[in-house]
Amino acid sequence: MGIELKGVTKRFKGAAALDRVGLTLEDRHIYGLLGRNGAGKSTLLNLIAGRLLPTQGEILVDGEPVLENDRALGKIYCMSEANYFPEGLRVREIFRFTSEFYPRFDLPYALNLSEKFELDLNAKNNKLSTGFGTILKIIAALASGAPILLLDEPVLGLDAGNRELFYRELIQNFSEHPRLIVFSTHLIEEAAKLIDRAVIIRQGTLILNEDVETLLEDSYLIKGPAQAADRYAEGRTVISSELLGGLKTVYLRGRPDPDAFGGDLISEKIDLQKLFIELTGRRKENQK
Ligand SMILES: Nc1ncnc2c1ncn2[C@@H]1O[C@H](COP(=O)(O)OP(=O)(O)OP(=O)(O)O)[C@@H](O)[C@H]1O
């Protein structure tokens, strides 16, 4: 059960926004879809949701092709920055509108969330502030009852308090109704607390799809004199490195081997945000 992308390429006027992506997303996991600006995250989510056609490749939902397949598409709720609600409808009317497409829409839950986020049920959706516009979309997604939630930058424009509330509600929702949730975000430190899998895209190419805990256990840095660091790094899986003065930092996959430190090196763990930066490219002038 889940989503499968097979050799998916999407070109816009010749330029590949996604290039031969093969990816499996399994049910009952929360995926963080990470990538720098323009990496292809929204394109990926829109392809899965059937809003874009792949130039090449195939997308399956629970084993069925998603294209023009109402049954497969009906399993997916995709929240994106673009507003797909009819203009001028009030919040409570949006909930009714959503329930027409998602028969398992949970209205009492949507009303309860609206109260928690202090969203005015009588406000017209096109008159909402950026943050409340996002809140409306989040609530419609969480209450949709869809077994697959695709959330494209769901915290865009939310203040810190509302982001915390959203993360809490998302975890609560997931623990009561485990499903497949994929959300893209640039706030990696915050996302690290709730995602269990990380998918990283770099310039249209999938570079990683891993369990976050394993990924962090299996990555580290070593720091020390350049020569000692280079000697240690030889033959190991290096993600990246940087040189500052005579001090070299090398980011690696695997487990540290203190026996090989030679007294000159120290090792440290890496957090998800740092790892993301090293995997997706730092400024060129600092690379060595
Ligand atoms: N409709 C479109 N027409 C032409 N090019 C597009 C279109 N949509 C996306 N692109 C291009 O595809 C690439 C990937 O864009 P996409 O929006 O998927 O990236 P993203 O990872 O979501 O970026 P961000 O984090 O900045 O939102 C970019 O180069 C973008 O300019």
Image: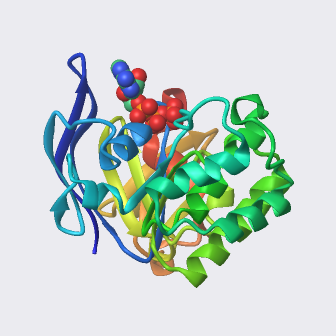
- Left or right of 213, for residue 201: left
- Whether residue 39 is visible: no
Quadrant of the image containing the N terminus = bottom left
Q: Residue at x 39, y 58 (%)?
A: 76
Labels in figure, total: 0
Q: Residue at x 32, y 49 (%)?
A: 48
Q: Quadrant of ligand 1?
A: top left
Q: From the viewer's perspective, is residue 247 above or below residue 72?
A: above
Q: Nearer the viewer, residue 84 or 268?
A: 84
Q: Quadrant of residue 245?
A: top right
Q: Position of residue 62 (x, y in %)?
A: 24, 69
Q: Quadrant of residue 105?
A: bottom right
Q: Position of residue 235 (x, y in %)?
A: 29, 62
The colour mode here is rainbow
Q: Nearer the viewer, residue 70 or 228?
A: 70
- Left or right of 285, for residue 43: left
Q: Position of residue 90 (x, y in %)?
A: 72, 40
Q: Residue at x 59, y 83 (%)?
A: 176
Q: Position of residue 128 (x, y in %)?
A: 77, 34
- Whether residue 143 is visible: yes
Q: From the viewer's perspective, is residue 116 above or below residue 84?
A: below
Q: Nearer the viewer, residue 31 or 165?
A: 165
